[in-house]
């Protein structure tokens, strides 16, 4: 039996994942709109045999937004361009199921999947904040549980459209003049609570059948949604114990929906900081953390409190009273609730929100040790790396990846040319072919 292998994805965030990284002397301030830099990163990640390039996104900006989010590429356009300069690495982009039409989204991701010869993935997000609604849907916000109910039907429509054509539907016989077999073209005719979509989609399936579905639902409703529809889950556990519990919970839920526990891969989010010594790694972290002012930190953190003015509160007293300002104490916001209940001050909360401290910090050996511990303990199937500073990605790829390879837990060559093949996720059988063959 072959040994289980770790999977690695990298979340590329141009000017950085914190308020201050763009100010570092070695940072490129316009990195978020520099395609040549993304191309360099993508090719470097592929040379190191990573599974996925991941592009996050959002539907609104404000003065409190991180610099990267203020001025950045649209994910599908960026990934389509990167598909032309890479060959094996997966291309996963974020797109909201709440504020976009399913036919258009099905077509966009199917196109990316064809362009890349089967390397596309969709990070399905459900949007519900008031600011997101203000830019979409005529300003109408959607209640938390309702948006997941909508998303479940949305995925049903998308996957149905992706099955519009059986794999051998396009005959393209020049002698007979038969371009396609009508019996193998299928019209969806979906009429549901939220969507009415006729179909069929005007593009056929890629070598991997359908794009891979990523999801990051953390609330109770979100976990059920992820366990039902996702191939891979983006998670944010704070400890090994939380990671093990989260992964076990998602695997149990997957089984309850009639799936195999192994149908879902869990990718904890980490921001590794690697140095020649532990002291150097700490210095690299401080070099970024010390660039942010408390004023900027408070402005940024206010986005998690419905943009409430936080400057009116004491900085260095326990800030438990701020819990009432958190709009939704599920999912992402649970971490803020836990921090406030633990007695953290507003200053601590704000500075840590802008420059989160990762436990995956130290020498390359120390970071590899912790990753291996999480992987072998069952807290992770892989990791989603968020590059930290202008040095973070290369430090990790050059220092940590070779150690993981030497230990036999990360690949030394790609297993496949498709994303599903490299992740070890089965190709979904076209529903109409399956029906005919039943």
Image (spheres, rainbow, N blue to C red):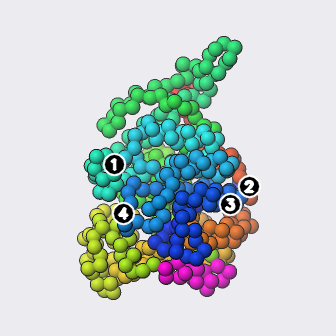
Q: Note whether 279 is above or below 235 in the view shown.
A: below
- Residue named by callout 1: 136
- Residue named by callout 3: 44
Residue placed most toward the observer, 16 or 280:
16
- Residue named by callout 4: 62
Q: Position of residue 323 (x, y in %)?
A: 28, 72
Q: Is residue 80 left or right of residue 413?
A: left
* Magenta-drawn stretch, dominant element (helix, strand or loop): helix
Dot 4 or dot 1, earlier in sequence:
4
Q: Residue at x 47, y 34 (%)?
A: 160
Q: Nearer the viewer, mark 4 or mark 1?
A: 4
Q: CA distance from mark 2 to mark 4?
A: 43 Å
Callout 1–callout 2 Cβ contact below 8 Å? no
In what element is the residue under mark 2?
loop
In what element is the residue under mark 1?
loop
Q: Residues within 10 Å of mark 4 (few under 14, many from 20)?
A: few
Q: Residues within 10 Å of mark 1 (few under 14, many from 20)?
A: some
Q: Name the quarter where the C terminus is drawn.
A: top right
Give the label on residue 413, or none: 2
The magenta segment: 275-291
Callout 2–callout 3 Cβ contact below 8 Å? no
Q: Nearer the viewer, mark 2 or mark 3?
A: 3
Q: Residues within 10 Å of mark 2 (few under 14, many from 20)?
A: few
Give the label on residue 158, or none: none
């Amino acid at each position: 039996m072959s040994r289980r292998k770790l999977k690695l994805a990298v979340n590329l965030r141009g000017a950085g994942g914190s308020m201050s990284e763009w100010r570092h002397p070695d940072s490129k301030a316009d990195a978020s709109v520099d395609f040549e830099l993304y191309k360099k990163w993508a090719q470097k990640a592929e040379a190191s045999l990573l599974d996925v390039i991941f592009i996050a996104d959002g539907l609104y900006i404000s003065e409190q937004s991180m610099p990267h989010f203020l001025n950045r590429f649209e994910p599908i356009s960026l990934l389509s361009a990167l598909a032309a300069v890479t060959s094996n690495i997966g291309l996963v982009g974020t797109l909201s199921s709440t504020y976009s039409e399913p036919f258009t989204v099905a077509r966009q991701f199917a196109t990316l999947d064809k362009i890349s010869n089967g390397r596309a993935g969709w990070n399905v997000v459900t949007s519900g904040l008031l600011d997101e609604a203000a830019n979409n849907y005529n300003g109408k916000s959607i209640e938390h549980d309702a948006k997941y109910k909508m998303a479940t039907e949305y995925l049903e429509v998308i996957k149905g459209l992706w099955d519009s054509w059986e794999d051998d539907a396009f005959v393209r016989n020049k002698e007979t003049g038969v371009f396609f077999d009508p019996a193998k073209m299928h019209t969806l005719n979906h009429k549901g609570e939220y969507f009415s979509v006729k179909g069929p989609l005007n593009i056929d399936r890629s070598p991997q059948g359908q794009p891979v579905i990523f999801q990051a639902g953390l609330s109770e409703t979100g976990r059920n949604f992820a366990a039902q529809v996702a191939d891979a889950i983006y998670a944010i556990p704070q400890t090994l114990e939380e990671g093990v519990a989260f992964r076990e919970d998602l695997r149990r839920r997957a089984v309850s929906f009639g799936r195999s526990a192994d149908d879902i891969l869990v990718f904890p989010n980490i921001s590794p900081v690697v140095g020649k010594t532990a002291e150097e790694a700490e210095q690299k972290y401080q070099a970024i953390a010390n660039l942010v002012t408390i004023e900027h930190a408070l402005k940024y953190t206010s986005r998690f409190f419905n943009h409430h003015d936080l400057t009116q509160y004491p900085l260095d007293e326990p800030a438990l009273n701020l819990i009432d300002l958190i709009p939704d104490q599920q999912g992402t916001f649970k971490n803020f609730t836990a921090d406030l209940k633990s007695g953290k001050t507003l200053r601590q909360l704000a500075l840590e929100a802008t420059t989160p401290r990762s436990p995956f910090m130290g020498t390359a050996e120390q970071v590899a040790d912790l990753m291996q511990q999480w992987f072998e303990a069952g807290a992770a199937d892989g990791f989603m790396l968020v590059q930290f500073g202008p040095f973070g990605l290369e430090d990790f790829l050059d220092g940590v990846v070779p150690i993981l390879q030497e230990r036999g837990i990360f690949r030394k060559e790609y297993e496949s040319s498709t994303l599903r093949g490299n992740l070890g996720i089965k190709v979904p059988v076209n529903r109409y072919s399956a029906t005919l063959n039943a």
